[in-house]
Structure formats: structure tokens, C-alpha cells
């Protein structure tokens, strides 16, 4: 190691730094080129496919909410026009309007309940998918007997999302403690442990 440092000193630290930055630039250029090749060939990464699925679900939900809002506005407009039309009418007509307003409140409560039910279903789906992914990562890490820094980071971030969606059962009791107890290995060639010539 001392001999390596001496050789680096002989070359000059500015030369070593320039080489280091050139290697970083080559890596960035390679990643950028890889993405452009995928795009040119019409191929997509699983992340972009997953993101598109999420975006489609969000767009579908927004469309449903917009339709509900439009119907609610139309219904409210019809009630307002009826109130103006029958303003001078008898108590009987006013009672009918009150009944319509109560129906509108019931409809709004029904819509709210549907939205809450939909969100609850989405949270349950998220929890189920993340639970499966967390178990799979846990199994892979325990089988290999160690975890990489990137693997640990991914596992912990998925755990946070899992908790926010309402999952908290087996994650804290088993999965997280067992993964955190594993040794962290820094693979050769990674940004944490670059390969060096001896």
C-alpha cells in the first residue's frame, strides 16, 4: 500500500485526480449512452414501465375524481336553479328542495366513502406488494450472508414506504433486524470500493 502511494506521488497528484475525473466522466457517458441506445431501440427499463403504470393509475383516479366533481357540480347547479325557480312557491316545494339537498349530502357522503374505500384498497395493495418484495430481498440477503450498501438502502427505503402505507407487522419484528444484523460488503468496482492495482 505504501509502495502504491509512493508510485502515485511519483506520477503526481494532479495526474491522478485528472485520471479519476476522466473515469467518472466515462462512467457517466456510458450510462447516458446506454439509456439513449435503449430509447433508440424502443426498449424500456422496468423502472420506466413501473412509473408508467403508476402514472396511468393516477391519471385514471384523477379522471374518475374529475367525473365525480363534474357530476356533483351539475347536480348542485340543478338544485340551485330549482331553488331560484321555486323561490316564491309554497312551503311544500321548499320541503321538496330540502329533501333534494339531503339526498345531495347523502350522495356526497357516498362519494367520499367510495374514495376512502378506493384509497384503502390501494394502500392494502401497496402493502401486499411491498411485503412480498421485502421478503424476497430479506431471503436473498440472508442466503448470501451479507448485504451491499445499495441493497440495504433499497431495503430500508421500501420499508419506510411499507410503514407509511400501513404495514408494520413482520417488518420490524423480523425482516429489518435480521437484515441490519448482516455484514455490509462493498463489492469490487463499486463507488464505495473502487478496484485498485496493487
Image: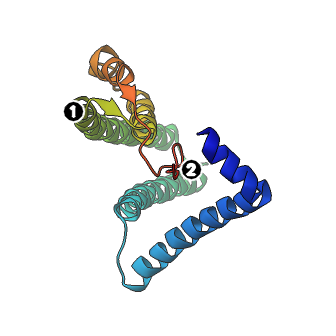
Which dot, 2 or 1, sits closer to the camera?
A: 1
For the point 65% across and 67% down, which residue is it? Answer: 22
For label 1, the crowd category at 10 Å Cα-Cα, with few meaning under 14, some 14 to 19 and many 20 or more, is some
Q: Quadrant of residue 110 in the image?
A: top left
Nearest the camera: 18 or 53? 18
Quadrant that contains the N terminus: top right
Visible residue check, residue 27 = yes
How far across and down, in percent of the image, does residue 51 sit? 41, 59
Q: How busy is the neighbourhood of tag 2: few (under 14 within 10 Å), some, or many (20 plus)?
A: some
Q: Which mark is residue 83?
A: 2
| Towards the viewer: 9 or 48 | 9
User: Is 45 drawn above or below residue 132 in the view shown?
Assistant: below
Q: Nearer the viewer, residue 83 or 19?
A: 19
- On the picture, is 115 further left or further right than 85? left
Q: How many marks?
A: 2
Side of 30 relative to 182 (left or right)? right
The x and y percentages for residue 173 are 30, 14
Find residue 78 and name its label. none
Q: Earlier in the sequence, mark 2 or mark 1?
A: 2
Residue to which mark 1 is pinned: 139
Residue 140: x and y in percent read 24, 37
Element under label 1? helix
Q: Residue at x 38, y 35 (%)?
A: 155
Decide if residue 96 is in sight here. Answer: no
Residue 64 placement: quadrant: bottom left
Residue 180 location, x and y as percent? Answer: 39, 22
Where disc 2 sits, the SS reads helix
Q: Residue at position x 41%, y 34% from top?
A: 152
Disc 2 from disc 1: Cα separation: 65 Å
| Disc 2 to disc 1: CB gap under 8 Å | no
Amino acid at each position: 500500500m505504501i509502495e502504491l502511494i509512493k508510485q502515485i506521488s511519483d506520477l503526481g497528484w494532479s495526474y491522478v485526480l485528472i485520471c479519476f475525473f476522466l473515469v467518472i466522466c466515462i462512467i457517466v457517458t456510458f450510462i447516458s449512452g446506454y439509456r439513449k441506445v435503449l430509447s433508440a431501440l424502443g426498449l424500456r427499463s422496468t423502472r420506466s414501465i413501473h412509473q408508467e403504470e403508476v402514472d396511468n393509475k393516477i391519471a385514471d383516479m384523477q379522471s374518475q375524481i374529475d367525473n365525480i366533481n363534474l357530476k356533483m357540480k351539475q347536480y348542485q347547479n340543478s338544485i340551485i336553479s330549482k331553488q331560484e325557480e321555486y323561490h316564491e312557491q309554497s312551503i311544500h316545494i321548499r320541503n321538496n328542495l330540502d329533501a333534494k339537498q339531503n339526498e345531495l349530502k347523502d350522495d356526497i357522503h357516498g362519494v367520499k366513502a367510495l374514495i376512502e374505500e378506493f384509497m384503502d384498497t390501494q394502500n392494502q395493495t401497496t402493502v401486499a406488494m411491498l411485503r412480498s418484495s421485502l421478503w424476497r430481498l430479506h431471503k436473498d440477503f440472508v442466503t448470501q450472508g451479507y448485504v451491499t450498501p445499495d441493497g440495504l438502502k433499497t431495503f430500508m427505503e421500501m420499508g419506510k414506504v411499507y410503514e407509511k402505507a400501513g404495514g408494520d407487522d413482520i417488518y420490524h419484528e423480523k425482516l429489518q433486524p435480521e437484515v441490519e444484523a448482516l455484514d455490509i460488503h462493498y463489492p469490487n468496482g463499486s463507488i464505495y470500493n473502487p478496484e485498485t492495482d496493487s
